[in-house]
């Protein structure tokens, strides 16, 4: 039972354009969402998060949007840079379950110069 | 800040052998997590500790897997006996505080069981 799904295994964009990574979830109890970025041979690193009381959170070139009714969130990167090429994981948690964080399968983003 | 330190980085072993993966969390972090990454299942939570106490081990696949955290600065994940299907990258992560604090991951141990 995959509660967090990233349906696109890969995404390729041109440098300077917008990258949009999508994530869907099924558990309506999830109330906190995070995006992690992972380079090869390294562990995932935290990128940006959003609480369910918000619908948008922005940090520099990165913006996360949350649509609770659709159980959907997305990560926008603009402008995209070649250094953004990595695997991006969406993750979610619910307060009542404490620390358990459920990850999606990941999306490989390639930004072409 | 040295980050979360995992050892070894790579482990190749034969089926049936015991494997021990090690993790040193970030100093001051009170929660520690073991994750496994495979192509088929992505990142799966195996077990996590809070203040050195195992809280949720429902992700541990079988009795062959065990994890310990004898003190705040060290944890082990042991597989005995190992099987080829255990081949994966195993990540350790730590966190300070509670629910809304992000996890900090180590660089993982790539385990290959032949």
Image (tube, rainbow, N blue to C red):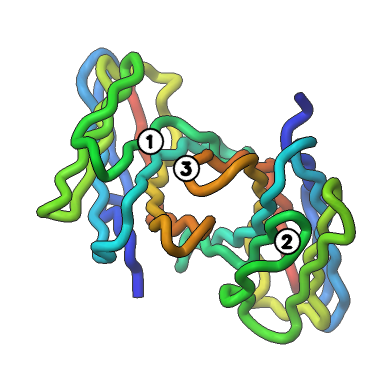
Position of the N terminus of chain B by quadrant: top right
Q: Quadrant of the C terminus of chain B?
A: bottom right
Name the front one of labels 2 and 1.
Answer: 1
Q: Secondary structure at mark 2?
A: strand
Left or right for B19, reference A44? right
Determine the image quadrant of residue B80. Answer: bottom right
Where disc 1 sits, the SS reads: strand
Q: Which residue is mark 3?
A: B100
Residue lying at 85% horizontally and 65% vertically, measured from the top left: B20
Task: Tell me what residue is drawn at x 88 percent, y 54 percent.
Answer: B71
**Chain for numbered disc 1:** A
Cβ–Cβ below 8 Å for labels 3 and 1?
A: yes
Q: Which mark is residue B111?
A: 2
Badge 3 density bin: few <14, some 14–19, many ≥20, Cα 10 Å: many
Pick the residue in front: B12 or B27: B27
Residue A49: which disc? Answer: 1
- At 26% from the left and 45% from the top, the residue drawn is A52
């Amino acid at each position: 039972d995959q509660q967090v799904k990233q349906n696109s295994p890969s995404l390729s964009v041109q440098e300077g354009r917008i990258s949009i990574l999508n994530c869907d979830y099924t558990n309506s109890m999830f109330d906190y969402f995070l995006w992690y970025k992972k380079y090869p041979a390294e562990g995932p690193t935290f990128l940006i998060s959003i609480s369910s009381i918000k619908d948008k959170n922005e940090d520099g070139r990165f913006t996360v949007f949350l649509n609770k009714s659709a159980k959907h969130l997305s990560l926008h990167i603009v402008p995209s840079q070649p250094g953004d090429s990595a695997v991006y994981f969406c993750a979610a948690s619910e307060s009542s379950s404490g620390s358990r964080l459920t990850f999606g399968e990941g999306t490989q983003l390639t930004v072409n110069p | 800040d040295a980050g979360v330190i995992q050892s070894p980085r790579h482990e190749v072993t034969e089926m049936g052998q015991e494997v021990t993966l090690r993790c040193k969390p970030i100093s001051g972090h009170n929660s520690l997590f073991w994750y496994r990454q495979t192509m088929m299942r992505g990142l799966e939570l195996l077990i996590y500790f809070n203040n050195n106490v195992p809280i949720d081990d429902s992700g541990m696949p079988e009795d062959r897997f065990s994890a310990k955290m004898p003190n705040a600065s060290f944890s082990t994940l042991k597989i005995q006996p190992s099987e080829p299907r255990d081949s994966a990258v195993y990540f350790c992560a730590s966190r300070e505080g509670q629910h809304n604090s992000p996890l900090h991951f180590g660089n993982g141990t790539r385990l290959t069981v032949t």
